[in-house]
Amino acid sequence: MGIMQHRRSIGRTIRCAVYLFLLLLPLLAVPRAQAQAEGPIYQIVLDGVISRHTVAYVRRAIQSAEAAQANALIIQVQSEGAVLRDLRGLAADVAQAQVPVVVYIAPEGTVSGAAGAWLLSAAHLAAMAPNTSFGVANPLAEPISNVSDQVRERFLDEVATQIATWNRERGRNEAWAERATREGVVFNNAQAAALNPPAVDLVVRDQADLLTSLEGRSVTLADGSQIILRTLGRSSQPLDPNLWESILLTLANPTIAFLLLVMAGIAIYAEFATPTLGVLAGIGTVLFIASMIGLLALPINWLSLIGLMLAFGFVAADLFTPSHGAFTVVGLITLVLSAFTLFDSAQAPGVTVAFWAIMLVALFIAVFAALGLYLVLRVRSQPVATGQEGLIGRLAEVRKRLAPEGMVFVEGALWRAVCEEGEAEVGEYVRVTAVYELRLTVRRVESPDAMK
């Protein structure tokens, strides 16, 4: 009897284990899912040129979001220029992030260029505002150095495959990746949404609409885990750059880097023109270092940078050589052409010095050079005011009768003088007309008006 009860007890235990296994089987058959309703929603804004400094900022933001187990990280892209070598690494970081990353091209009117094409592809969820676009008319990738055609083709194949893979894994259109990599394409939000399947997940008006539309969406991360977004009725928390990151991001702006370089040249030139015990030279050095920090984060055309230096040299030379403005004209032409071609457009599409900044600098230098040339010519046209030649035209008092030779008093000293016409008595005034071997030639002053 005891044996039968023991057998029935074992049977019940086995049946309970089977039932428990059957209950858990649906959970074991699907990827791990996490509904992180309590996790924060972070947001960063990419404004300006995307360079190596931007990459460092975004990496820190992703690490912060991962450490806080954020429900999502929203990257709002409103940048129009990017360095391709840095952008590619940034896109890989976004794709491998251990938190859902939502890339949102906004606000309306944003032309996100290459940055939009890369980051939308890598994002777990891609969104655009109305009247925005992504992509450029140039290839989305270009080898940094001169390579053979075979190596270039292999590189472009790799890039096209990567962009297509990211989009395919996210269920988005991948057909445009090949053409964008080799030739370049530009899609606005309507065109991207009209593709089959669409190239973006959402087209929303603003941040509030974005958070509402993200509610309940499931995101699969690189490790295979799934996260369900809980964004309804919530707001995002900004992850602003720290002070050092803000400085670096500002210096990497091509227009600011150009202006700092020009101001450095002006300060150093002013130190040589009017020595200030090194104050202006120190300021110029600091400005030059700051400009180099920004310029070295961007792909520079070194010939154009040398052209800028030559332009400053031409303008400065015009103040010391009688070219009557010819050097200044050559310098201004060199400056404008060098500024327009300062950055490699193939490696950094959309990265240029602002037109207004180039024209402002050219106008300032032209006015500065014209003023300097005017002052130089004015000084040259004035009579000599020092030394013996400075006595010519001055009034002198006769101290010893001129018959025709005698002594006159002028500029606090007695001089031997010879009167050109007739004689002059003591106390009369004469005007100096020439100086020869410490002897003055003078002429009598006939009327009181001539003494003025």
Image (cartoon, rainbow, N blue to C red):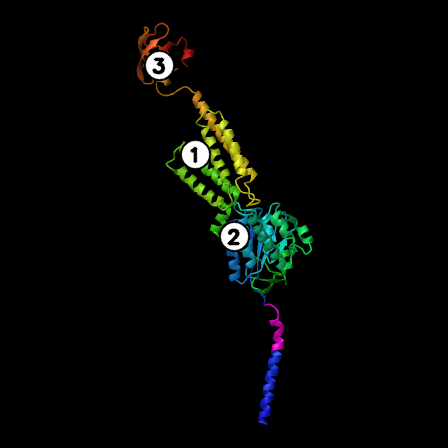
- Eye-nearest disc, 2 or 1: 2
Query: What residue sits 33% from the left and 9% below the top?
Result: 418
388 lies left or right of 139: left
In x, y percent, where is residue 353? 54, 40
Residue lying at the far bottom of the rendered structure: 1
Q: Which residue is mark 1?
A: 269
Q: Which residue is mark 2?
A: 55
Res 447 → quadrant: top left
Q: Is residue 131 above or below residue 366?
A: below
Residue 134 position within the rendered picture, expressed as x and y whole percent measured from the top left: 62, 49
Eyeballing the image, is 91 above or below 348?
A: below
Q: Amino acid at mark 1?
A: Tyr
Q: Nearer the viewer, residue 300 or 42?
A: 300
Query: Amino acid under label 2?
Result: Val
Q: Amino acid at mark 3?
A: Val
x and y, in percent, of residue 125 in the image: 61, 57
Q: Residue at x 48, y 48 (%)?
A: 248
Circle nearer the N terminus (3, 1): 1
Residue 112, visible in the rendered structure:
no
The residue to which callout 3 is attached is: 435
Is-magenta flag for residue 412? no
Q: Residues within 10 Å of mark 1 (few under 14, many from 20)?
A: some
Residue 28: percent from the left, percent from the top?
60, 72
What's drawn in magenta, residue-wise?
21-31
Q: Residue at (52%, 51%) from the top-left corner? A: 54
